[in-house]
Amino acid sequence: MPGPYVAPVVGDETLPKHVDVVVVGGGIVGASTALELAERGHSVALCEKGGIACEQSSRNWGWVRLSRRDIREMPLMLEARKIWSGLAERTGRDVGYRRTGIVFTADSENAHAQNTRYRDQLQDFQVSSDLLSAKDVKEKFPDLDLPLHGALLTADDGRAEPQLAGTAIATAARDRGANILVQCAVRGLELVGGRVSGVVTERGTIACNAVVLAGGVWSNFFARRYGIDIPQLNVTASVLRTDPLEGGPEEAIWCKDFALRKRLDGGYTIANGHENFVDIVPRSFKYVFRYLPALRSDWASLNFRASGQFFKDVFDAKLRPLDEASAFEYTRVLDPVPSKRLTDGALAALAKRWPVFRQATIAQRWGGCIDVTPDAIPVIDQASKVPGFFVATGFSGHGFGIAPAAGRLMADLVTGKAPVVDPAPFRLSRFSDGTKIVLSPEHA
């Protein structure tokens, strides 16, 4: 089944000869970076091998949250929330952003204690969040029959539409003068004296002063040609959407068996709250020791499998001459097969606990690939081995909500402006300078 419908962005016909910055990857992070740079008066080319926001940027849950977020991401997410609040006016398009609240349920005393610690963390950042008792949850959602110890409700958390936001941001970048190039894979960099001087695309060369790699799951393959190791593995998630349904909650809600978010069209995006698939690939063996903390933390939620993806990764990782077609041209849009067991199981679990969802009908299922780093926070940094080459990747399933601020931080780094937040937690060198790899303090 094909992925979600994304309003198409028609690409520019003419390849520019020279721009200040080329952004590689037309997901929401790349589009946000392009918009920031264009608004500052820099010439930009946003190059996408397929269509704008057609991979994970349009396939995620659509949550925009501060709650239960790694503390290292909090300053960036606070900035992102400010940007989301004005994004419709800034782009001239409704991106579906609404502050309707997010509820994280707790099914045990340990989970409730964890919610308490996250509530305290939010208070440290002057963000209001409420701990709900089981009785409070029942009063708020009287039709929800779910055994609970309580829940965490953050009213200022919200939602947006993944199928609208990325394209709106890219189109706004074009309105500010950016070149938007779709079906235009970047095969590699051009270097002069070891420094970025341009990119080689399937349609020709673009001279530039800087390149931002925002390639999501493809970033590892692109960067390795230049001796840059971005430790990154992929997790495949599965999601369904329903037809419009009356009587469901406005808030997004998470529990282990299901997670749901109301959509702008009145339907719901629903997924399993905790299970995903991980394909065993060559990189799995290369990075296994770096991912041990994550494996210990999330072992029960990961379904490992041997599949044809092993051999596809071998093909995709092959270094080809820049005058030949790249792996990026062989896979225009990564469209993994969704798990019917996980999606249908999530809806069945939800319908068992919430009668209104027994009337829900499935409109579509899709899969998406999430690029995950060993510590589950992104890389937003300049690659020291190649002056003029910057990387924004590895958002580990948190990228949609944080993307507008990630684009702002990346634009700051490219232009030499004082960064909007301290970029040190997102430096690439943390994986090679002896820094201990830790997950969120809740997992350490």
Image: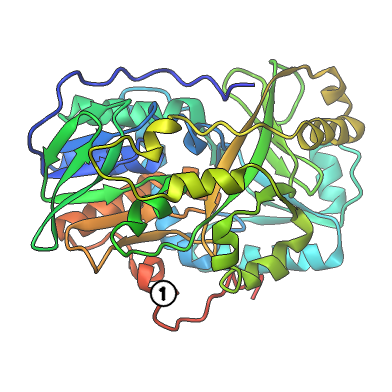
**Residue 115 is at least partly visible in this image:** yes
- At a point 24% along the width and 28% down the height, the residue shown is 180
Q: Position of residue 337 (x, y in %)?
A: 66, 31
Location of the C terminus (image quadrant): bottom right
Q: Nearer the viewer, residue 94 or 72?
A: 72
Three-letter code for the amino acid on which mark 1 is drawn: Arg
Q: Residue at x 78, y 17 (%)?
A: 361
Decide: few, some or many residues near mark 1? Use Cα within 10 Å; few <14, some 14-19, many ≥20. some
Please state if 39 lies on the left or on the right of 313 as rendered. Answer: left
Q: Quadrant of residue 416?
A: bottom left
Left or right, residue 291 beside residue 407: right
Q: Position of residue 66 (x, y in %)?
A: 54, 53
Q: How is the image coloured?
A: rainbow
Whether 281 is drawn above or below 7: the answer is: below
Residue under circle 1? Answer: 430
Q: Residue 147 at x, y = what percent?
A: 92, 49
Whether residue 230 sits left or right of residue 276 in the image: it is left
Is the residue 199 above or below the residue 66 in the image? above
* Residue 132 makes an appearance in the image: no
Q: Nearer the viewer, residue 148 or 218?
A: 218
In the rendered view, would you say 72 is above or below 40?
Answer: below
Q: Which type of secondary structure does the marked residue at label 1 adopt?
A: helix
Question: Residue 230, percent across and down?
Answer: 42, 62
Residue occupying image coordinates x 41% and y 74% = 430
